[in-house]
Image (cartoon, rainbow, N blue to C red):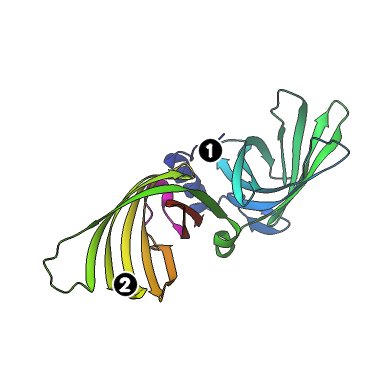
Amino acid sequence: MKRKPPNVFFYLFAGVCLALGLNFSAAGQQTSLTGDWTGDSICVGHNSSCHDEKVVYHITIVPFTNPEQVQIAADKIVDGKLESMGVIDLIYDTTKQMLAGDLKNSRFGGMWQFTVRGNTIEGALILVPGHYVARQIRVHKIEPTQKESSMTHHATGTFEVKITPQDDKSEDKSIGRMSIDKQWQGDLAGTSKGQMLTGGDVTTGSAGYVAIEKFTGTVGGRKGSLIFQHSATMTKGKGDLTITVVPDSGTEDLKGISGKLIIKIENGKHSYEFDYALQ
């Protein structure tokens, strides 16, 4: 199941709390729980259905509650992509520096227990009856300088493209201009339009092009638009193509997106791989 982005007013309330200095104190340091945390969730015991996981916790604080209520939107990393595992509701004990809450699962009961120590959270999933530890979790906070490298997503899919030459009424055939229209399927779903400038003579196997292309749709379920910048050179039949996201071109849920796109053509069909990060 895909997690819906939090309401914009929720971000506003959280921002007010942080602006007022409502951070949590842990191990003698001022540490805000709000943000992204990553680490390991390790199976304990001999449960064959349990698997060790690399996890990412997106932690938010429910504003104006007493005691403090904390929500963890939990993802696991599978093949370099984030997969949602749902939302964990917890209560934060500011005196003991502990997070605790019940496990919501129709198959068995249990509880989450975490201790906050600065920029590290450690804890366990305890199952009942029996009160035995099923998982041990240790995560650390992702600093802003780490976020892009730590939160990279991998998107794949196919697209159909229509390229239409534009008549500039020029007698110089070594330079051309074309329009781009694409239909995207897969992790990128939507359409894009752009303009391409070409130069050279393809009959010699050497040419080049630059292009600007605006994509509108969804990326990994997130809605918005972004702009791709193309730069390509072909030397005697050997090509070198770079496609990157124009900085700060993302809108709506794609604000802050960065990344690189790779295009593959096999048997006349176009596919892509897109590695991107969201700040």
Q: Name the residue under label 1.
A: 64
Would residue 259 be counted in the magenta stretch?
Answer: yes
Look at the picture and state if 151 lies above or below 136: below
Q: Is residue 201 left or right of 8 when viewed as pictured?
A: left
Q: Crowdedness of circle 2 by 10 Å Cα count: few (<14), some, many (20+)?
A: few
Q: Which of 156 and 110 is in front in this view?
A: 156
User: What span is in magenta?
Assistant: 249-260
**Residue at image coords 38%, 70%:** 232
Q: Which of 118 and 162 is in front in this view?
A: 162
The picture places residue 128, in percent across and down from the top left corner, at 83, 27
Could you say which is closer to the camera, residue 74 or residue 211? 211
* Viewport quadrant of the N terminus: top right
Could you tell me residue 92's position as x and y percent?
67, 41
Give, as a three-letter code, the residue at label 1. Phe
Q: Position of residue 145 (x, y in %)?
A: 56, 65
Most extreme residue toward the left, as rendered?
A: 169
Q: What element carries label 1?
A: loop
| Gap in angstroms between the C-alphas marked 1 and 2 | 69 Å
Residue, far top: 106
Q: Is residue 58 visible?
A: no
Return the residue at label 2.
203
Q: Is residue 239 toward the left or the right of residue 134 in the image?
A: left
Task: Give the residue displayed 56% in from the left and 50% down from the top.
Answer: 22
Q: In this view, does 14 lie above or below 102?
A: below
Label at residue 148: none
Amino acid at the residue labelled 2: Thr
- Say what secondary structure mark 2 lies in: helix
| Placement of 183 over or under 206, stated as above or below | above
Q: x, y percentage for residue 119?
A: 68, 57
216 falls in the magenta region: no
